[in-house]
Image: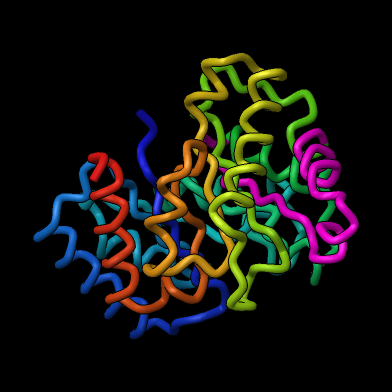
Amino acid sequence: MRKIIIAGNWKMNKDASETEQFCRELGRYLQDHDPEGVLPLIAPVFPYLAQAQNILRNLPVAVAAQDVSSHAEGAYTGEVSAAQLRSLGLRHCIIGHSERRQYHGETDALIRAKLLRLRENGIRPIVCLGETLEQREQGLTEQVILRQLEGCFEQVDMPSGEEAVIAYEPVWAIGTGKTASAGQAQEVHALIRAWLQKRHGRETAQNIHILYGGSVKPSNLRELLRQEDIDGGLIGGASLQNEAFHAMIGIAAEASKGN
């Protein structure tokens, strides 16, 4: 059975003291609550990754980066390489988030290059996919998702399904308060898993984690996790408050036990 991943993408939020306070409170929560069947994950901004990693060391939680350079090293001012992330002990990194696609013009080809850099360094990419509201209203959701899968994973070998995580995040549901219904989300998650089975075989398709992202919060997480192909959430705003994040870990722990 796949573990449930509760991933908090902090985006450009929290300073050093706020990061420390959040991580210490999360650490206390995890010491008192065994999140069996769940992998909690937080993705702070680059300057505080080492701080978060040190505070949460030896606890059942992962720290991830929000992005990575497609270059290995060199004269790329402001960029952070996969090897540098690896040197911090990180094992996860988000790539292809819709905000990176929208504001920085990132293409599937660039996301694929980042994926390969992460793989070279033993870091598990969390690859984001999703359609805009216009594309959904035009009935193009399936076409868009399949195109993104083909572009991001072109000639990428995934023999076990442990090589990556996929996050489906409909762009129209990010930061808007709108959420795809559980049925809408499941439909796209099933499409992604069917594509994986066709390209990489049943074992890979059954092992890989597919997360839902888009205004996920404690009030809707339980219903999302009841869906067969939804393995957790990539959570924005609701992951910034300890109380809400702890609640979502608890909901996931219950779901992992079939409650």
Q: Which residues are magenta?
A: 121-150
Q: Position of residue 196 (x, y in %)?
A: 66, 26
Q: Quadrant of residue 41?
A: bottom left
**62 sits left or right of 166 in the view:** left
Q: Residue at x 80, y 71 (%)?
A: 103
Residue 207 vertical placement versus 130 (above, below): above
Q: Is residue 124 magenta?
A: yes
Q: Nearer the viewer, residue 217 or 102?
A: 217
Residue 204 vertical placement versus 237 (above, below): above
Residue 175 vertical placement versus 135 (above, below): below
Q: Position of residue 61 (x, y in %)?
A: 30, 52
Of all residues, the one furthest to the left in this rendering is: 32
Q: Residue at x 62, y 60 (%)?
A: 180
Q: Nearer the viewer, residue 89 or 204?
A: 204
Q: In the picture, which quadrant includes the N terminus?
A: top left
Residue 61 vertical placement versus 241 (above, below): above
**248 sits left or right of 31 in the view:** right
Q: Position of residue 244 (x, y in %)?
A: 33, 73
Q: Residue at x 17, y 65 (%)?
A: 29
Q: How many marks?
A: 0
Of all residues, the one furthest to the right in this rendering is: 138
Q: Nearer the viewer, residue 156 or 80?
A: 156
Q: Position of residue 131 (x, y in %)?
A: 77, 56
**186 sits left or right of 55 in the view:** right
Display coloring: rainbow
Q: Residue at x 47, y 55 (%)?
A: 233
Q: Is residue 256 magenta?
A: no
Q: Quadrant of residue 256?
A: top left
**109 sits left or right of 121 in the view:** right
